[in-house]
Amino acid sequence: MFDLKGHAALVTGSTKGVGRAIVEALAAAGADVIVHGRAMSVEAEQVMERCRAKAVQVAFVGGDLSGPTEPVISQVFEQSIAAMPGIDILVNNAGQYFDVPFLDMTLERFEKTMRLNVAAGYFLTQRFARYWIERGTAGRVLFVGSVNGRLAEVDSTAYDTSKGAVDMMVKTLAVALAPHRIRVNGLAPGLVRTEATRWLDGQPAKAAWLAHHTPNGQIPPADVCGPGVVYLVSDEADHVHGHMLMIDGGMSAWQQPEPMS
C-alpha cells in the first residue's frame, strides 16, 4: 500500500529484533536501506541478504552508539552519507537494557543507558537535520520508544527513564524541525518476541501472565513493528508530526487486568 521507492533509510541497531523487522519492512516497501550494528556480523549479513532480495540497494555501517557520543555519531553519519548521499529517512532504533535494581544503580550504568537510548538518537538526528536543511531535503525521522516510556517496570528505572525521554523527544523535535520540512514521529512496541525475550519460551507461566496483561492476549514477533514505521515515514503520513504510535496490543490503554482464573 505504501511505496517508498526513491527513498533511502538508515536504521540504527538493525541486525536483529525490532530493528531487523523495521529495515526489512522498509526494503519490502521499496526503500534503499542502510543496516547498522556495532560491527559486521553473521546477523548483519543475513539481514542485508534478505533486504537485497527485495531488489533494493543495501549498505552497512558500524559503530557502537553506547560509546563516546560525538566520535561515533560522526562515524555513523559520515559512513551513511558516503554510502547513500540521498538518504532521507532516519530510524533511531538502537537501544538496550542495562538495568540493575535502583539501589544498586551506578552513574556509569545510568549514563551508558542514556547515551545509547537518548543521546545517540538526539545528536544523530541533529547531524541529519543539518544535512537535509542544507540540501532542501524533506527528511523523515522515526524514534523507537517502548511501552516502558509510559508504564513503569520493576528494576527498570534507567531504561524506563530513557524511554520516557524518547517519548518527549519525539514531540519536542517535531516542533523544532517541522518548519524545516522534517517530520519526526515515534513507534513504541509493547512486549514482542526477539532474542532479548527468548527466555519466554522457557517460562510458559510467566509468558501467559504477561500475555494476560495485554488486551489482545498476544506476544507477537517483532515483525508487527515494521508496517507502522513504513506508514509514518511515507508520503501518506505527511501531516503526522510528533506522534508516538503504540504497537502494544492495547497494553498501554489498560489500567489493570482481572486476575487470571
Image: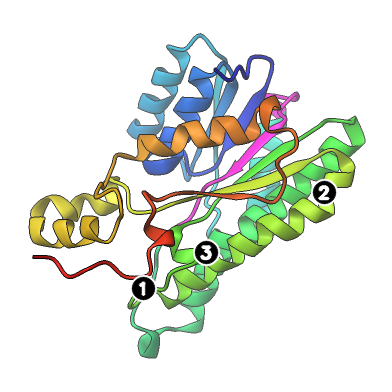
- The answer to whether 43 appears left or right of 117 in the picture is left
| Residue type, label 1 | Glu
- The answer to whether 40 appears left or right of 33 in the picture is left
SS under mark 1: loop
Residue 145 makes an appearance in the image: yes
Residue farthest to the bottom?
Answer: 103
Tell me, yes or no, whether the two marked residues, 3 and 2, touch with CB atoms within 8 Å: no
Asked if the magenta segment contains residue 208, the reply would be no
| Residue type, label 3 | Lys
Q: Earlier in the sequence, mark 2 or mark 1?
A: 1
Q: Nearer the viewer, residue 66 or 228?
A: 228
- Provide the residue designation for mark 2: 177
SS under mark 2: helix
Marking on residue 163: 3
CA distance for labels 1 and 3: 12 Å
- Provide the residue designation for mark 1: 153
Q: Which residues are magenta?
A: 82-96
Asked if the magenta segment contains residue 88, the reply would be yes
Q: Nearer the viewer, residue 164 or 199?
A: 164
Residue 68 makes an appearance in the image: no
CA distance for labels 3 and 2: 21 Å
